[in-house]
Amino acid sequence: MTFSRVRALIFVAVLFVTAGIVVIMAVSRDSQNKASQTLSCAAGEVPAHNDMPKQDTVTINVYNGTSRVGLAEDIGAQFKNRGFKVAKMETAPPAANGKPYDNVATITYGPDAVGSAYLVSAYFLVKVATMHFDIKRKGAVVDVVLGTQFQQLATTTEVNQSIAVIGKPPLEKGTCEA
């Protein structure tokens, strides 16, 4: 091999190394790698977290909206066994309309808990629980009020099927993806 070829190979190798260093520095110093929430939301919209999390990151409050004694504690314990964090297990306050909770469950959540609420709803099967979104609600805690039609939580297979049907939870009116 001639000296001119060796010199050309060294020059090309130096160019490759320099190009690699420039690319690594550009990627590591990129200031656009974290999108701003304000850029993705229109005026007046509230950022909402609609990615479905894992159970161990979800905190719920379980309320008994029936006359069955100990129902909140029993179902709260079942949610704990399934990996959820349960903050409260109490009797539900009276319904706003004065009527009993005549459904399977009412799930109340805010913008920080959209994905969490849909994960919890999978434990009552698809579209069985009544979803109640409150855009002014702060925090990622999900409230579950068990109604008079509640029988039992879904099995693991039923939960997995419900999660597959739900997919990515939809954004509520007045929100944008955080």
Image (cartoon, rainbow, N blue to C red):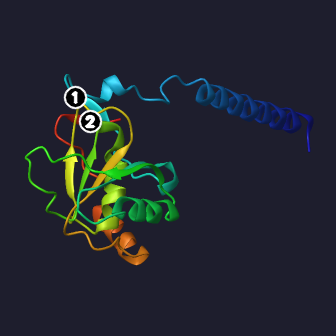
Q: Secondary structure at mark 2?
A: strand
Measured from the top left, where is residue 39 in percent x and y? 32, 24
Q: Where is the N terminus found, in terms of image quarters?
A: top right
At label 2, which amino acid type do we have?
Answer: Cys
Residue 45, numbered circle: 1
Residue neighbourhood size for the residue with mark 1, other residues' Cα within 10 Å, grouped as few (<14), some (14–19), many (≥20): some
- Residue 60's place in the image compared with 15, above or below, is below
Check if mark 2's residue and mark 1's residue have beta carbons within 8 Å. Answer: yes
Q: Where is the C terminus found, in terms of image quarters?
A: top left
In this rendering, position of residue 40 left or right of residue 15:
left
Measured from the top left, where is residue 52 in percent x and y? 39, 52
Given residues 92 and 85, the one toward you in this image is 92
Q: Quadrant of residue 151?
A: bottom left
Q: Secondary structure at mark 1?
A: loop
According to the picture, the residue beneath numbered tag 2 turns out to be: 176
Do we see residue 168 in this rendering?
no
Label 2 and label 1: CA atoms lie apart by: 6 Å
In this rendering, position of residue 120 left or right of residue 3:
left
